[in-house]
Image: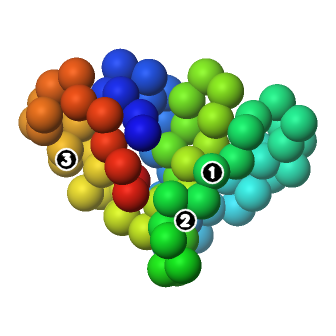
Amino acid sequence: MVKNSEIIAIFNLRHPQSAIYSEYVERYRDRYKLIDAAEGDEYASVVLTKDTLYLSAISALTLKKRADAGFMAGACYTNL
């Protein structure tokens, strides 16, 4: 579960620039806990918090829209 206030960044893995995410993860792999919240689905995005990378099947655009709209402000999300 992730609180809106804990989200630092959301990476879109379906974009050509997703290589930036791969490079970031390779460089700082030991710094973060990695959580697979996609439940067997293909990864569409990654949510970065202070100490965790969450792999998600939900698109980065959908996650951004939810955050921008204050979707369930202060809520905790499962199945990012």
Q: Earlier in the sequence, mark 3 or mark 2?
A: 2
Question: Mark 3 — residue?
Answer: 65
Quarter of the figure with the N terminus = top left
Task: For marks 2 and 1, give the one nearer the viewer.
Answer: 1
Question: Mark 1 — residue?
Answer: 35
For marks 2 and 1, give the CA distance.
Answer: 15 Å
Q: Amino acid at mark 3?
A: Lys
Relative to 77, say whether 35 is above or below: below
**Which residue is depicted at the point 49% across and 27% down?**
8
**Which residue is depicted at the point 88% across and 36% down?**
30
Q: Secondary structure at mark 1?
A: strand
Report whether residue 78 is seen: yes
In front here: 20 or 32? 32
- By what rule are the colours in the image chosen? rainbow
Question: Mark 2 — residue?
Answer: 13
Q: Amino acid at mark 2?
A: Leu
Image spot of residue 64 (x, y percent): 28, 45
Image spot of residue 21 (x, y percent): 67, 52
Q: Earlier in the sequence, mark 2 or mark 1?
A: 2
Q: Earlier in the sequence, mark 3 or mark 1?
A: 1
Q: Please tell me the numbered disc located at residue 17.
A: none
Q: Are marks 2 and 1 in contact (CB under 8 Å)?
A: no
Position of 31 with respect to 72 (left or right) is: right
In front here: 37 or 10? 37
Report whether residue 17 is seen: no
Looking at the rendering, which quadrant does residue 69 occupy?
top left
Image spot of residue 49 (x, y percent): 55, 29
For marks 3 and 2, give the CA distance.
Answer: 17 Å
**Which residue is depicted at the point 54% across and 65% down?**
13
Density class for disc 3 (Cα within 10 Å; few <14, some 14-19, many ≥20) is few
Relative to 5, say whether 11 is above or below: below
